[in-house]
Amino acid sequence: MCLLLPKADEAWLDGFIVGLMDDQKRYGLFLSGGDVSSTPGPLSIVITAFGLVEKGRAYTRSGAKAGDLIGVTGAVGDAVCGLKALREGIEAPDLSAAYMTPDVRLYDALPVRAVIDISDGLVQDLGHICKQSGVSAKLRWEDIPLSSGVQGWLTAGHITPEDVLSGGDDYRLLMAVPPSAMMGFLGRDPAFRIIGEFQEGSAHVSVIKDGQDYPLKKTGWNHFE
């Protein structure tokens, strides 16, 4: 870890250290050195994580096949709502927490062919699987799991379906699930859902809403804008 501090704020550091210790205990990690230094600003925290996986057991983006189902490991859209709440001063503690402290869950031995996490946007990250696997994807808006908070914001017009589809930072997993493994996949966790399917074709993601193609002006976060 590289930690660059504008000032030595002991109260902030105490809280940071406690949070870092909690995460290490929860996920079985340990901090192995790094550097702490001062900076004119802003605060900078850079963490590089290393891990090991047995040969041939890594989940990649390149294994999806036409006919596979698109699985997701939980509700999406909370984080993009949380970011909007924080930016605009809207009181929404559950949504804000989803952005500030996402619930990252770990799974092992899932019956899937390809995996990616939703960090830059559901549609954009799904597109990465399509590109690496040489397939297209069709999502069904009505099947995408949403929390009651996100549903309330959609009804009130605070956000649009496009915001949910292109917002990131939920860290749910998108997966290519063979049809024969669908029941095994859904049985792993009540939050798991099937939200579409992979098809033959070029690397493209389409969204069906109310029986029609739902056009998107944005698909996710652009790191260089």
Image (spheres, rainbow, N blue to C red):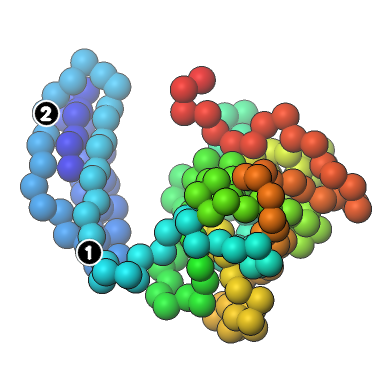
**Which residue is at a point 21% across and 23% down the rendered structure image?**
6
Residue 37: give its label: 2
Image spot of residue 191 (x, y percent): 61, 71
Q: Is residue 77 left or right of residue 6?
A: right
Q: Is residue 186 left or right of residue 15?
A: right
Q: Which residue is mark 1?
A: 52
- Quarter of the figure with the N terminus: top left
Q: Secondary structure at mark 1?
A: loop
Q: Residue furthest top?
A: 40
**Which residue is at a point 47% across and 55% down the rendered structure image?**
61
**Disc 1 versus disc 2: distance between alpha carbons?**
29 Å
Q: Is residue 21 left or right of residue 90?
A: left
Mark positioned earlier in the residue sequence (1 or 2): 2
Image spot of residue 136 (x, y percent): 66, 51
**Which residue is at a point 63% across and 82% down the rendered structure image?**
180
Tag count: 2
Quarter of image, res 199: bottom right
**Which residue is at a point 72% across and 29% down the rendered structure image?**
217
